[in-house]
Image (cartoon, rainbow, N blue to C red):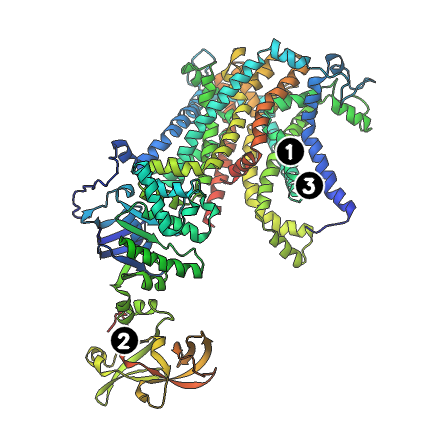
Amino acid sequence: MIEGARWRRWVFFHIPLLLFIVFLLFPFYWMIVTTVRPDNELYRPWNAANYTPFWTLRPTLEHIRDLLTETLFSTWMMNTMLIATVSTVISLICGLFAGYALSRLKFPFAGSIGTGIFITYLVPQTLLFIPLADIIRNFHLGDTPWALILTYPTFLIPFCTWLMMGYFKSIPKELEECARIDGAPRWKAMAYIIFPIAVPGILSAGIFAFTLSWNEFIYALVFLSSPEQKTVPVGVTSELVRGDVFYWGELMAGALLGSVPVAFVYSFFVEHYVSGITGSVKG
Amino acid sequence: MATIEAVTPRVYAGTPRRGPITRLLEDERWLASFLLMPTIVLLGLFIAYPFVKGVLLAVTDTRVGIPGSFVGLANFEKLWHDDIFRVAVYNTFLYTFVTTVFKLVLGLWLALLLNRHFRGKAFVRAFILLPFIIPTVLSTFAWKWMFDPTFSVINWMLFHLGMITGRINWLGDPDLAIISVMVVNVWRGVPFYAISLLAGLQTISPELHEAAAIDGARAWNRFRYVTWPLLLPVTMVVVLFSVIQTFADFQLVYVLTGGGPANHTHLFATYAYQIGVGTGLLSEGAAVSLAIFPVLLLVVIIQLVYIRRVETV
Amino acid sequence: MAQVTMRSLNKMYDEVHAVKDVNLDIRDKEFVVLVGPSGCGKTTTLRMVAGLESITSGRVLINDKVVNELAPMDRDIAMVFQNYALYPHMSVYDNMAFGLKMRKFDKPEIQKRVREAADVLGIGEYLKRKPRQLSGGQRQRVALGRAIVRHPQVFLFDEPLSNLDAKLRVQMRVELKKLHQRLGTTAIYVTHDQVEAMTLGDRVVVMRDGWVQQVGDPMTLYNEPANRFVAGFIGSPAMNFADVRIAGENGGLWAEGEGIRLKVPAHLDNRVGAYAGKPVTIGIRPEDMRVARDSDPPELNIPAVVEVVERLGSEILLDVAVGSVTMVASVEPISRAKVHEQLQLAINPERLHFFDAETEAAI
């Protein structure tokens, strides 16, 4: 890059970047400040003289304590963890298998099956939630974790398959041919040679799938009804709001704590996550 | 292939006998069917079947607990005359168009900023993705709190910057409410655009820029004639993905306005939810949902045609 | 202990007929090289022997057993690939042991065999490393080692030296030859490099467009090419060709072309005689031409104009114009030929080749 004068660098680079960062991260800062702000400070109108938006002098953990003791938040966390983990594992296995078949094997209708899976990749959950709710009821899965464990893979599998196909294509074919000549049956060449090499791709797909299922809202909202079955997003939405009363302290504490697992997973695998994003659009 | 003698595999020293399943799976077609089985079952059961069921629902008058009878296109006809549905249609297209333009422009801008070398770049890149990875509903609550008419930090800021004099009811005014929802959507979408486009930018060899610079191209022309054309394929895919997601958006509106005030901010999905789940008119709700389908189909077709074109080049 | 036999082997991909009616008998302990330009079907043939490609029609037999329907794992063969195909997530040891583990060998036996192979190839100290920590030559050795630990019936090589630099390639070529002499395992080797083919092969199979052009030991291919393609493919620099017409005059046959008038050597008279009055192609290897001396009979000389002089040290290559054709002559290093010089090139009459102008078959 050709370097300009110092002020140009500020105007065209530092200031815009700074504004982006503030715009993108401020809501999280706000979440944190609200969580630790005592109620009497919290409900002080913005035009009040002693409104101090960006800090608090008497931080408190009472919202977090209330959230953990007086609501089912920890149950929702466990539910979400279970549902996200199991549906991710199911989707990974399916996506790994399907991605391998579609990128490596010759069989009739391979093209149309691939296109079919690609199309389901684009089907939004909001298109199907009403008839799907009916089906869930008919299968007697309503209000159980299984309703989500079995339906989340529908938007995770296409994504995992797509990503794994891209990854498998980057692995030389000769590796498994060599393994097959070395005495391995096809499935062992796949399981012992190709899958271990694909671990970075599997990680990317897994992390992405995990965050997607942690994030999912409408299926969880429609298929679950009893408070102790809910996931974090739905629990926070429905149980921390009573009619028109918003318990903002607890809400923000819930939003904060509910984000921790994804943020935690994400922080360890940023690179994998980013390659998941780029893989998801490149294929 | 006239006569092929019977195959009697010699058993070599140390060679285990192959079981019947291993033998079967040596055949590509069997292995492929085995590998695709779970995917096809799950997708068939929870995508294809509900889709068909949705279509069937939409042509009946089913309500929760009451099996309906065939009514043809009556549900769709009813929607045609439904003012709220019209508003929802208008909102959905407006919402998708406006936010996509903003996400693309801002995302590209951010990507170009991040494509330069500076200290702490990896750090910045990791942090700006947060809006995209943090569960949407949860971060949207933070925005709702920031938009609160009485306690809004945004009002405080604007007031102290001298840009407003009184309070602004961000989510209470119909026009402001849809803008507020759009802001949050843009906020959530920009990181995805930026990171995807950044990945695209990084595949462009710096030598091309140097060559263009030597050829006398100024910064804007370098972007216009080198960067943009090479970035177009990635941009295309990112935009199409995002258009579908935005078009079918539910969470933001559900949390921020619930479709209000006075049903002014409904999108397809929230309206479908209100009718189908809220009111229990399953058939009508399914019909509203299905209205997403033509747009989805269009995008899928563009996508497939585009991918095919790219692949054949 | 293995013969490999191919009987009217064919491979069709949708529209493309990649391998056409290949028949080949490879004897026990033989090192056979399949050579030809890219797309000639040599690799596909090899892959059908390996079981990686289905056979459209025909048969592959190993030790007189048809193996068409046998999975690669059950054919007891080993293959070395161009990109080595080392398993990147396994150490060198595990790479070499994989085939043995798959065949359920017991651990001490695996250790013994890997040790042996590693010692033979001089990679004993790298056993714990991952493939990415090795140089190109070392990877090549590991790939070889993985093949030899198994003591397979047949070795298959698919352009194994192509990814090495020129110097290493020559070195590995010699080592491969030694290895084969030591192990005596039947080997089929695919390459596009005729020098590799000539130096390694007990017999060489030249292929083109899916057809086998000629099978023979290296010197036979060189001395008695079956057709113009083989003649041009084998030997470096390549054989020179010129279109001529056969004329009978003064009780002898003459090959007359643009700027060329050569007497057909008497021992070829009865074969070439049938072509009297017809067009044929003559072929002269660069090394069968030299700058004419006064003692050379003028009816075996060609007038030529020097265009480029390439001094290689051990020889000098003259690119010369003969009529409108460019030919290459390999002359003694003491030659003082200069650019634009007109000179006479003397042909070795014993080594003149004639090809049918239409069928391109040797006459």
Q: Which residue is mark 3?
A: B119
Asked whether residue B208 appears in the rendered view, the answer is yes
Distance from disc 3 to disc 1, alpha carbons, whole Å, reads 15 Å
- What secondary structure is found at the residue carrying circle 3? loop
Q: Tell whether label 1 touches label 3 (CB within 8 Å).
A: no
Q: Amino acid at mark 2?
A: Phe
Location of residue A72 with respect to C309 vertically, above or below: above
Mark 2 closeness class: few <14, some 14–19, many ≥20 residues within 10 Å: many
Image position of A150 (left or right of C34): right
Image position of A224 (left or right of C203): right
- What secondary structure is found at the residue carrying circle 2? strand
Tell me where residue B215 sits by quadrant. bottom right
**Which chain letter matches label 1?**
B
Mark 1 closeness class: few <14, some 14–19, many ≥20 residues within 10 Å: many
> In the image, which is nearer the foreground, mark 3 or mark 1?
3
Question: Which quarter of the figure is the C terminus of chain C placed in?
Answer: bottom left
Q: Amino acid at mark 1?
A: Ile
- Residue B128, labelled with which disc? 1
Q: Amino acid at mark 3?
A: Arg
Q: Which residue is mark 2?
A: C354
Q: Could you tell me which residue is drawn at 38 percent across and 46 percent down?
A: A174
> In the image, which is nearer the foreground, mark 2 or mark 3?
3
